[in-house]
Image (spheres, rainbow, N blue to C red):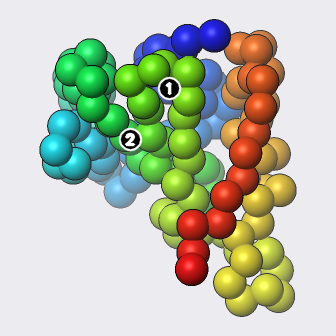
Amino acid sequence: MPVTIDEVLDWLTAAGWSLARDGRLNYMTSGGDWHYEDPASETAARAAMNATLAAGSVTAISLWAPEGHGVNTLFFPDARNISFDLTLNRRLLPGSGMATDLGWYLSKLSPAFVGAGLSAVVAKDGRP
């Protein structure tokens, strides 16, 4: 089922994620250009992201959990796949040193998508 940027961001913010950290909204438009804006610019940021997606390019935005861990949320032109890059103040498994606490991220992200027909979750370690 296709989803829109606005739907996903609304679901995630309702689940407790924030679009701003340290007074900044961080989002990516075409060409991989990252923008750092005042949170009051959220409407303009969403419009720029939607325009990027409509032009056939990937777009992204940083989201933050109340605990201070973040994700870069990537949206793809097919509107059927979303990726979460878990590298913003990454939460590690206790005592692991390097392993990401995927269970924690799933417990924080999945509830936002329960009513949206989430069909699959794929975890992939991008580290060599």
Residue shown at 76%/59% (left/top)?
102
| Residue 119 quadrant | top right
Residue 93, x across and y down, in percent: 79, 75
- Which label's residue is closer to the chain start, 2 or 1? 1
Mark 2 residue type:
Ile
**Of the pair 1 and 15, the residue shown nearer to us:** 1
Disc 1 residue type?
Leu
Quarter of the image where the C terminus is located: bottom right
Where 27 falls versus 125 (above or below)?
above
Q: Where is residue 122 in the image (x, y as percent from the top left)?
A: 73, 45
Q: Are marks 2 and 1 in contact (CB under 8 Å)?
A: yes
Residue in view at x 30 percent, y 42 percent:
27
Q: Can residue 43 be seen in this view?
A: no
- Locate the N terminus and report the quarter of the image it occupies: top right
Give how far apart the Cα atoms at labels 2 and 1 are: 9 Å
Q: Quadrant of residue 19?
A: top left
The correct choice, above or below, for 46 with respect to 89 in the image is above
Q: In this view, does 127 lie to the left or right of 111?
A: left
Q: Nearer the viewer, residue 39 or 55?
A: 55
Q: Is residue 65 above or below residue 119?
A: below
User: What crowding class fits label 1: few (fewer than 14 Cα within 10 Å), some (14-19), or many (20 or more)?
Assistant: some
Give the structural element (helix, strand or loop) at label 2.
strand
Identify the residue position indicated by label 1 in the image: 9
- Helix, strand or loop under label 1: helix
Expressed as whole percent of the image width and height from the top left, the position of residue 62 reads 42, 47
17 relative to 104 in the view: left or right: left
Q: In this view, does 45 lie to the left or right of 62?
A: left
Q: Is residue 60 visible?
A: yes
- Give the residue pinned by disc 2: 61
The total of numbered circles placed on residues is: 2
